[in-house]
Image: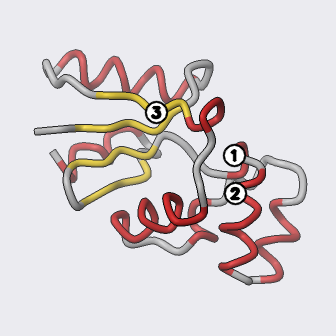
Amino acid sequence: MAITVYEKRTCTTCRKLAALLAERGIDFDTVEYHVEGLSEPEIRALLAKAGIPASAALRMREEGAAELAAAGDEDAIVAAMAQRPELLQRPIVVNGGRAVLARPVERVLEIL
């Protein structure tokens, strides 16, 4: 089972997820998308695996997020997420062809 976690290391929820996976003895790879960035196709692929629209993965605490959500333009949201990775909610966990936005962290259990 190849688990990949898209995270920000300083994020409290990301650290809780890492602890949950470690408690269960589950190895995983991490992608620090805040550092490495994600392209629009990569973001679209993650959203498709999770079965959610970009608006559902929008981090509403970030500046400009409310305006993007109100406009309702999924393409504009994905483009903004590619330009400003902090707009993408975290952590996102991928297991094969499935993914989940692990908020709360226990949601990861759905794809294990």
Return the residue at label 3.
31
Identify the residue shown where x is 36% and y is 22%. 18
Instruction: State the residue in front, 102 or 34.
Output: 34
Q: What label sits on residue 27 in the rendered view?
A: none
| As drawn, 3 above or below 8 | below
Q: Position of residue 48 (x, y in %)?
A: 39, 71
Describe residue 81's horizontal placement relative to residue 104 as left or right.
right
Proximity of marks 1 and 2: CB atoms separated by less than 8 Å: yes
- Indicate the secondary structure of the residue bearing disc 2: helix
- Indicate the secondary structure of the residue bearing disc 1: helix
Instruction: State the residue in front, 31 or 90.
Output: 31
| Category of crowding for the residue at label 3, using alpha-carbon neighbours closer than 10 angstroms: few (below 14), some (14–19), many (at least 20) | some
Measured in 3D between alpha carbons, the distance from the residue under mark 1 to the one under mark 3, in whole angstroms, is: 12 Å
Proximity of marks 2 and 3: CB atoms separated by less than 8 Å: no
Return the residue at label 1.
85
Return the residue at label 2.
81
Q: Position of residue 90 (x, y in %)?
A: 54, 42
Q: Amino acid at mark 3?
A: Val
Q: Amino acid at mark 2?
A: Met
Q: Position of residue 92 (x, y in %)?
A: 44, 46
